Image (cartoon, rainbow, N blue to C red):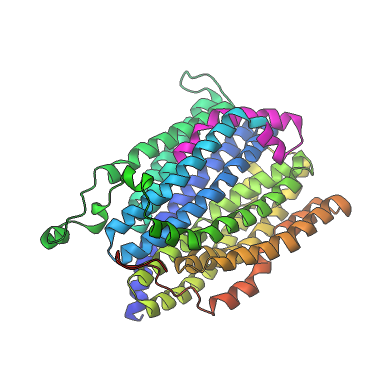
Amino acid sequence: MAPEKKVFYKKLFALVLPIAFQNFMLSLVSASDAFMLGRLNQNAMSAVSLAGQVMFVFHLFLGSMTIGASIFVAQYYGKKDMRAVERFTGLVMGPTFIVSLLMTALSAFCPRLLMKIWTSDPELIELGAGYLRVVSLNYLLTGVTEIFLCVLKNTDRAKKSSLISSGAVVINIVLNAILIFGLLGFPAMGIAGAALATVISRAISFLLVLPDFFHAKRVPTEGDAAAVSEIPLAKTISFHLSDVLHVDPLDRKDFWKPVTPIVANMFVWGLGFSMGTVIMGRLGQDAIAANSIASVAKSLTFCFCQGIGAGAGIMVGHELGAGQLDTAKLYGHMLCISSIVGAVITDIVLISLTPVLLKVADLTPAAQAYLPWMLVVNALNILGGSLNSTTISGIFTAGGDSKFGLKCDIITLWFIIVPAGLLSAFVLKWPVLVVYLIVNLDEIVKLPAVWVNYHKYNWVKDLTRDASEPST
């Protein structure tokens, strides 16, 4: 194996495995919610799954902020400019805190209104509203924590980020069992117990991540070259409230230029994706229940592919920030190949889980009939989704090529998939599984345009600047 490939795979697995494990552990929370609440009854599981769509919408914004943070933290870290890393951490934290606080307020005081977006079933609305009230504080805790975890991943501390998240997930799952079913002398709280477990575990991860940013060593001043060499670069990064309150106008301009299309893209994609859930949510409780299990199974198995996508942005960003543009192109090519291999492995695992899911999920006969075919559809979606997440969310955005994803999703989702899904479900009234296939074809439809854009190499750009340089 060529030396550059050995370096590539060493970096890839140092990033992908911790991130993939972190994503897997986070997905286990949804899986444990679905499994444990499914043991209560099908409607409890379905209500929490629909209530989870509110967090999904929140994650569209939060995902935009973490992608934006990754672009600049990765490149400036590759450039070894730690003060710039601090400035951009503060810049991202400001809007993230405001939106997180807003979501907490909406979940606490308007939960029924939020649930009515996703379903018209009165029982599911009431059950989901109860969950949202209890889980409301989770939005604020999640927003702040995820920005800090993002910075850890982009500054050679992906393993620590994974350990913090994974430890909180273990706590969440244990508390789920205790609070949902009333173990160890605690009262059985059902859905409210699942929500409370989520809030407690997220509060713990929040407390665990703080020391890295409030007890870090200050960046040595000019002339302290010896001190710089003795301190690992990542250990010199601190969080300063002044960076939140007083943002450099040039930094703000640099940040929002590529990130504004990312925010728009995330909502265009996410709302289009959510339309699939809205459509399925009006096709009956059996379709909702089977879709809930299929979604959890996809989330659990798709983690390695997501890890490649997240690692792609960091790896390519480091090389671009360091000025190694040819290396960034090589890494992009190898990351695309890795994403395809990861998708094939993921699909094999997903389909092999079918008998297990049918056995452990407490579903009606109709829902059981839907589930195997929904898993096949998800396997098809993963084939395209793995490559698309690696390129659009990882490689392209690492170099500031963020407009392509927005254009691609507007056309794919809002001119093709969503109209076809609405037409097939409510006008033509096609069978549930046909509708499900249609609303999950977006990742396959995108592939030709993604491949063409990749080979234009618009993403091979160094976005950093020296303090004395004007914003580009």
How many marks on residues? 0
Above or below, 329 relative to 226: below
| 192 within the magenta span | no
| 115 within the magenta span | yes
Above or below, 204 relative to 152: above
**Residue closest to the far right:** 428
Can the viewer see residue 441 in this picture? no
Residue at (32, 45) in percent of width and height:
242
Figure quadrant of residue 222: bottom left
State which region is magenta. Answer: 113-142
Above or below, 39 relative to 423: above
Residue at (36, 65) in percent of width and height:
75
**If the image is split into quadrants, where does the C terminus sit?**
bottom left
Can the viewer see residue 58 in this picture? yes
Residue at (54, 49) in percent of width and height:
61
Q: Residue 210: x and y, percent?
A: 32, 41
Q: Nearer the viewer, residue 203 or 223?
A: 223
